[in-house]
Amino acid sequence: MTAPTSLDLHRVTVRHRGRPLVDVSDLRLEPGRPVTIVGESGSGKSVLAHAVMGTLDPGLEVGGAMSVGERRLDLADRSNRQFLWGRDLALLPQEPALALDPTMRVRGQVAEGVPGFRRRDQHATAVAEAALGRLGLADAGAAYPHTLSGGMAQRVAYAAATVGGARVLIVDEPSKGLDPASLDRLADLLAEHTAGGGILLTITHDLRLARRIGGRVLVMREASVVEQGPAEQVLDAPTHDYTRRLLAAEPSRWRHRWAPALPPADPSPALVTATRVTKSYGDVPLFEDLSLRIGAGERWAVSGPSGVGKTTLGNVLLRLTSVDRGTVEHAPAAGGGRLQKLYQDPTLSFPARVRLGLAMRDVVQRHDVAAGRLEELMTAVGLPPDLLDRRPAQVSGGELQRLAIVRAMMARPVLVFADEATSRLDLVTQEVTVDCLMTELSDTGCALLLVTHDRDLATAVADHHLDLGTPGRSRPSLAGILPA
Amino acid sequence: MTRLRMLSAGLLIALVAFALIGPLVLADPTAQHLDHYLQSPSLAEPLGRDDYGRSVLARLAHATRLSLVLGAACVATALLVGTAAGVASAWLGGWVDAVLRAVSEAFVAVPALLIVLMVSALASGGSVWALYLGIALAQWVEYFRVVRSRSGLVLGSPAIEAAGLLRLGRLHVVRRHLWPDLRPMLTTLASLGMVTSILAMSTLGFVKVGLQPPRAELGLMVTESFAFYDAAPWMAVAPVAVLFLLTVCFLGLRRSETVS
Amino acid sequence: MADLGRAVRVVSAADRDRVGAILLRRGAQAVGVAVLVSVLCFLVVRRLPGDAAYRIAAGRYGYDLVDEASADAVRAELGLDRSAWRQLGDWLLDLVQLDFGRSLVTSRPVAEEVGYYLAGTLQLVAVALVMALVIGGAAGVLAARRPGGALDRLTSGWVAGVRALPPFLLGLLLVLFFSVHLGLLPAVGHGGATIVLPSLTLALGLSGLVARVTRDAVVEVRQSEYVRFARTKGLSERRVLVRHVLRNAAVLLVPYLGVQAVILIEGVVVVESLFAWQGLGHALVHAVFWRDVPVLQATGLVLALMIVAVNTAVDLTVRWLDPRPRAREAVA
């Protein structure tokens, strides 16, 4: 027996020039029972969500239908759902920071979603302020979007999307760029929505969020659903091979030969020594009186929410940025290009208009790299040699990051600074990339400084852990050696 | 190379050939034949003769050569000076940047025409040097600002930081990062600069400042021909057509039209 | 969060800081411009060959009445007999005191003449700007509704064509067409219908670029994430246009107008000469021809300061429209 207000999807298909992007059989979304679709990029999960909403690019061919209660709507006609937008169907977009008009105050952007909104509508403004207040943003009404943090922008977008009272909420990849605390808050909001009898469809690649939301989970791979069932079952004891592979890629389940072990009894020689460094950013103090010592072969992880200064600390330790007070010393072994860095977006770290082969050759020549070493490293990380004929923009993020690892290793580094180097990658790609990096590091005895907001990743990789806590708090806690 | 660019390049080459070969082959542009006053086009003189009996075709060839050569000289100078200053500003920063920016701020608000007018007021009776100096002075700021902003972006990117960590050196930065990024932009600016220079020269000729008669210059030819428009329309059409073609060709050479 | 050192500074609550910074920067630019123009004019004075002074005297008194003594008097008036640095010092001092002297040709105080010409130029520029914004703006918005469509391609063609025509040619063509052949509009004169042709010449050239920029801005804004989100919130197309598209497109368009100010002023000089419109451009060209340096300096200065004023207005307008901090500075 289903409540009359459920949403049914009938055989949704999306094609791009004949190639299927989505091919999903019937699906029912019921009020109070959230549905989450997980998968990697390219699986078609986002495309499915947009096909339901009606916001797909015009170049794609859509098939199938959707029923809201009695009414049946053909998905191929993009305009037939527009009258539902805001009042019955709401979409929470992927990047909330980009989804807010930068020239309009927050309050106005929420108020315009209220049904029957008119210019200078006091009733709508009051409703908007109330909605913002419920989300803990009572003072943010007059602010402009660029002053909001990622989590705050996400909540504003939530308020704006749901203030119209829509019962069906589609959430598209909410975890991009959000730290764990903000993600938890969002999960609470979504739980509230479901508890109030709303229908929730979430698209995500973050398995922890999927577990948090609960309900039913569908695993998508290459346009079709490979497994579905209750969240507790699918995400802990899956039956399909692909789902198992996906779960194994979560950092908390990693079992690799380079996993952190207990450190040796004698401390290794120091590479980088920071003594009582202090840095502020404008009025915001990032860290104060921090002392740190990275020894040869050690693996450090620096974690904390976004905005707290993790990247700045890394840059300070590599002497790429200056400090306000204190000193940073490099041992002689760490000079002359022995400190290398991996960037969050590897496309930006290569010369953009030059073939990759040429860029790599420059490094080979500069560092007197032995003949064949480049090919050897590329094989070790699993990259085809013809990759070198392409330009950075023509290569995927995961492959380019592995090439960046090759480039860094050719300089025979003693310390590699990985600055959120895998944050933008899928789970499986992340595992492959980190595996490549850690294998190379352990083979050469090189040290690691990893900056990440993913605590599981930090635990899986590092033996020393520095938690910078919340912004403004100047007392970071130094967690000791973590057991393997 | 799109069809438009090929067409523009082809037409331009034809015009350049006309400008270079014409003065060598055709009649003397200053030779007056007053008995052939306003002669209509004929086989011997395809564009007829003007009010002094001079060959319009010969004058046109000399005028085109002048525009092209002077334009190229102005653009080359402005490009070299502006680019060097822009890169220096972005790379060195500090007081070098502050001084160069302050100087460019003063220049940028003074229209090119104004600068050229004033510089030609400096010279007596309109010399080519004054024109060259004026137009080059007016244009360097654009190259400076654009190169400085682009170089600033490139030099601030993670790629440069990585190259620094890899100790790849300054030459590498220029060869692999700066030059590939600036080159397409500079070629676009250079084509636009040619258009601006040629039009500025002709505009000055039109307001009778700058080059003086009996010099053959496109703008001067247009002005002089206006009085005889009814009797000899070819006198006006020829220089206008060449001006228009030159402009269209240079505009068509650019890669793509983007505003920002 | 890479390289915070070079990125955005923490935004402080007071808006006044930004406005103050804008005014300070433009003020400094105005001073720099004034110095540049004055020094250029000073160099002109220094390089005046003897017979130029003679010519100026002749222009003032008439060729029959002029003699060596009057040429000497002109030279003394311009202070050509003193040392170079002293002259420059006196020159700049005069500038600071806003003493522009008297015209070497008409002997009237320059300030008076410039005031008259300024009014003429302002009229012309105002009419041309309004025409350009209306024609160009409308064409741009309409073309943006269907990128790649017929109207869009027509607009692109028109922009390219207008770009290839220098203002003097365009003006000549318009005169030929409207005055000579059709006899509809007067070519020269002052007042009433005579403003149509010169301002139309200016407006046509400017409107092409306005249309192009407007079209690009509207297309870009309409494809943005925030416009998509606004639609999915349930807003009608018209409301999306008014509340989001227009303002964000203006943020892209207005700085471009600042750049256009320079081109507009250059067009003004040419158009006023062609149509013998009594404005600053016309006066400037005459001053160059007659080497009337005081008038040359004053008109050049006022024209350049007009550009600084337009750019100041542009900066302030952008600041009002867009609250985001500017990590990079404005275009001009």
Image (cartoon, coloured by chain):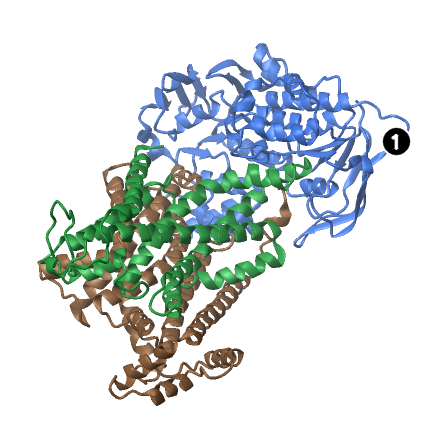
Of the chain colours in the picture, the one used for chain B is green
Q: Is residue C92 visible?
A: yes
Q: Nearer the viewer, residue A398 or A390?
A: A390
Q: Which chain is brown?
A: C
Residue projecting furthest to the right? A266
Q: Position of residue A298 (x, y in %)?
A: 80, 30
**What's the chain of the residue with tag 1?**
A
Q: Which chain is blue?
A: A
* Residue depicted at 84% across the width and 24% down the height: A262
Q: Nearer the viewer, residue A365 or C156?
A: A365
> Does residue C9 appear left or right of residue A336 in this picture?
left
Q: Position of residue A129 (x, y in %)?
A: 49, 49
Q: Which residue corresponds to mark 1?
A: A267
Q: Position of residue C169 (x, y in %)?
A: 23, 56
Q: Position of residue C266 (x, y in %)?
A: 33, 62
Q: Nearer the viewer, residue A419 or C109?
A: C109
Question: Is residue C278 placed above or below A36 in the rendered structure?
Answer: below
Q: Is residue A163 visible?
A: no
Q: Nearer the viewer, residue C62 or A48?
A: C62
> Does residue A440 appear left or right of residue C38 in this picture?
right
Q: What's the amino acid at mark 1?
A: Pro
* Residue depicted at 15% across the width and 48% down the height: B45
Q: How many marks?
A: 1
* Residue depicted at 15% across the width and 47% down the height: B46
Question: Is residue C70 placed above or below B250 in the rendered structure?
Answer: below
Q: Could you say whether the residue bearing mark 1 is in a helix, strand or loop?
A: loop
